[in-house]
């Protein structure tokens, strides 16, 4: 071999070694490492192992921190990957400054972690569904964790749904606002991330309003930093991109739980109102310009359930069926304190003059008597004066443990809210939104993994759903006792949490004539056709329920199609 060729070969080998060494982690201590990434693709795939503790990853470009995130980097097994978008940083080199928080005595030396070998770059992140339990017609995130629906509004024929989202794992962390849109409340299209963390904190729940006078959409959200404060952002392109106002936060408090702003236009006072969850009460504000808010009053003491923190309020005026009366309803989500443990949605019916809410009743009233109905809020600016609600379909008792990995959590089917009277009392009516009829297909002889069962009820009814594995869910309606129940104790996989196997029971205010039961791969939602009952429960059967036995009623099974 010639001298020139030897030198060239030696230099090529040296350059290769330098490239490898540059990409290998620099170990700085027992729990601290840095990794230089030479950007050659859009995404860096971060390997996740859910049993591990979060590692803090600081993304540094040109000596400046561009992002900070928490991710459970894999130690000895990769459960799944999440993408870190490298192109957004606009640099050919990115430094990852990583601090691990797990117990090194249990996990071993940082240098041996499998995450270093599995961090690869790619131009395409494969989000193809790999989950047996991913719903077919319920909204879910493409990947990652989701909880509360946020900022929902309707404009120009499009329903906008934002949601609490963790892009870097399928358990709660790194709260941002994810975004999906739909033209029919059933089929959802993923949009770019709407609002991300900043120096004030991560992005907790909130609301959007359509400000018609100024042709804009305005978002209000909780900045969760050292304390919870309220911030504002404005969109001039129908909610696709938001610009945060320069003088955030717009509302502050010394209270530790101060969150979830719900704003709405109140024509009766020709001003905006805003409701905030503060500890175990709701505080009401008013504003003429959406930016300067005046405190009006508080509601909560002596009313409803107070076993947990009050969250995610909503306040609306509704018609009482069959009358010319209107009443106001205040939605108050609470965790814990639900009727069967954990999270749930309570509501209050009364009057509101733009300044003070006055409740008509002292008893606690639940909007849904299942275990998996929480963070319920409605869309702003819905057509025809409708109040269309979505709920997070899970429970904080086990939300992080349900048996999925690529994603966690779905939202409920859309529901229209109104009021009805029974024995002199006013209750919230919950009926399936009309959009669900559009996906009702042909009648079939037995249940499928995605179907609607319509049951014409006699006086007392028992309905059993089951499969070939002996897994079953039993629904019962007792007309004399005016009570409905759902037993999921033998529904399938119930092993991931002691709080999961349960029988939920609901009072029924009036007589049930027809039930509409919505089944998807991991959920059963039972709604009375006249809105007198709502019960939402997750289920995780090893195979779909394909057997149906009804006593005391006549059932028709419809396929749900178009997915």
Image (cartoon, grey):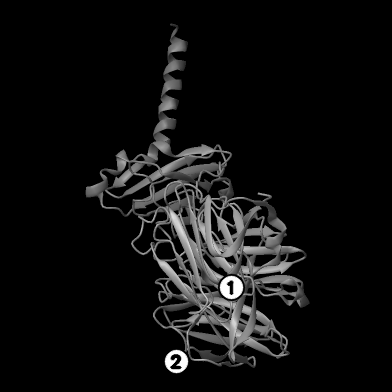
Dot 2 corresponds to which residue? 302
Q: Is residue 165 visible?
A: no
Q: Which mark is residue 515?
A: none
Instruction: List x then y, in percent, for residue 418.
Output: 65, 79
Instruction: List x then y, in percent, for residue 455.
Output: 60, 64
Dot 1 corresponds to which residue? 377
Residue at the extreme top: 1
- Looking at the rendering, which quadrant does residue 385 occupy? bottom right
The first of marks 1 and 2 along the sequence is 2
Q: Is residue 466 visible?
A: yes
Other-residue count near label 2 (Cα within 10 Å), few / some / many at <14 / 14–19 / ≥20: few
Circle 1: element type: strand
Given residues 381 and 473, the one toward you in this image is 473
Instruction: List x then y, in percent, for residue 458.
Output: 58, 71
Circle 2: element type: loop
Measure the C-alpha gap from mark 1 to mark 2.
23 Å
Q: Quadrant of the N terminus?
A: top left
Given residues 432 and 405, the one toward you in this image is 432
Q: Is residue 128 above or below residue 208?
A: above
Given residues 7 and 393, the one toward you in this image is 393
Residue drawn at the location 50% of the way across and 46% of the way down: 131
Residue at the extreme left: 105
Instruction: List x then y, in percent, for residue 551.
Output: 52, 63
Left or right of residue 9, residue 515 in this image: right
- Looking at the rendering, which quadrant does residue 227 occupy? bottom left
Q: Is residue 45 above or below residue 103?
A: above
Other-residue count near label 1 (Cα within 10 Å), few / some / many at <14 / 14–19 / ≥20: many
Given residues 74 and 184, the one toward you in this image is 184
Residue drawn at the location 39% of the way across and 80% of the way down: 307
Left or right of residue 381, residue 496 in this image: left
């Amino acid at each position: 071999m010639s001298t020139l060729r030897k030198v060239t070969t030696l230099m090529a080998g040296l350059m290769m070694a330098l490239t490898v060494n540059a990409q290998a982690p620099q170990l700085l201590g027992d729990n601290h490492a840095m990794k230089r990434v030479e950007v050659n693709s859009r995404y860096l795939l971060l390997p996740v192992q859910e049993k591990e503790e979060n590692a803090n990853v600081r993304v540094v470009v040109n000596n400046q921190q561009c992002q900070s995130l928490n991710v459970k980097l894999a130690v000895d097994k990769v459960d799944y990957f999440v993408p870190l978008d490298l192109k957004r940083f606009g640099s050919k080199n990115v430094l990852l400054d990583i601090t691990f928080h797990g117990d090194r005595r249990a996990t071993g030396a940082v240098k041996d972690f499998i995450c270093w070998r599995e961090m690869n770059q790619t131009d395409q992140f494969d989000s193809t569904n790999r989950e047996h339990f991913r719903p077919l017609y319920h909204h879910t995130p493409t990947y990652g964790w989701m909880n509360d629906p946020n900022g929902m509004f309707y404009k120009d024929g499009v329903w906008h749904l934002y949601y609490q989202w963790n892009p870097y794992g399928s358990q709660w962390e790194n709260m941002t606002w994810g975004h999906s849109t739909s033209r029919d409340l059933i089929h959802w299209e993923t949009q770019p991330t709407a609002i991300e963390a900043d120096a004030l904190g991560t992005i907790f729940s909130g609301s959007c309003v359509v400000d018609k006078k100024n042709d804009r959409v305005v978002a209000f959200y909780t900045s969760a930093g050292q304390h919870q404060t309220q911030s504002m952002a404005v969109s001039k392109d129908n909610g696709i991109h938001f610009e945060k106002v320069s003088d955030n936060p717009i509302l502050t408090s010394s209270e530790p739980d101060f969150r979830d702003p719900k704003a709405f236009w109140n024509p009766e006072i020709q001003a905006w109102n805003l409701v905030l969850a503060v500890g175990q009460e709701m505080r009401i504000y008013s504003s003429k310009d959406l930016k300067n808010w005046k405190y009006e009053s508080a509601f909560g003491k002596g009313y409803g359930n107070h076993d947990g923190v009050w969250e995610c309020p909503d306040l609306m005026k509704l018609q009482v069926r069959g009358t010319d009366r209107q009443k106001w309803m205040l939605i108050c989500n609470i965790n814990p304190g639900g009727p069967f443990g954990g999270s749930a949605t309570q509501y209050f019916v009364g009057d509101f003059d733009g300044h003070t809410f006055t409740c008509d009743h002292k008893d606690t009233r639940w909007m849904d008597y299942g275990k998996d109905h929480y963070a319920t809020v409605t869309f702003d600016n819905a057509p025809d004066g409708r109040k269309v609600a979505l709920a997070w379909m899970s429970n904080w008792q086990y939300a992080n443990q349900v048996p999925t990995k690529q994603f966690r959590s779905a939202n409920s089917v859309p529901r229209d809210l109104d009021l009805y009277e029974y024995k002199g009392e006013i209750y919230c009516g919950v009926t399936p939104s009309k959009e669900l009829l559009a996906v009702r297909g042909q009648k079939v002889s037995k249940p499928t993994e995605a179907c609607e069962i319509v049951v014409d009820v006699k006086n007392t009814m028992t309905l059993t759903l089951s499969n070939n594995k002996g897994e079953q869910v039993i629904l019962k309606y007792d007309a004399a006792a005016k009570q409905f129940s759902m037993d999921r104790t033998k529904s399938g996989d119930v092993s991931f949490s002691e709080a999961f196997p349960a029988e939920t029971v609901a009072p029924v205010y009036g007589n049930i004539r027809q039930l509409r039961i919505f089944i998807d791969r991991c959920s059963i939602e039972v709604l009375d056709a006249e809105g007198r009952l709502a019960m939402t429960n997750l289920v995780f059967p090893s195979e779909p329920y394909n057997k149906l036995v009804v006593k005391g009623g006549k059932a028709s099974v419809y396929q749900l199609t178009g997915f």
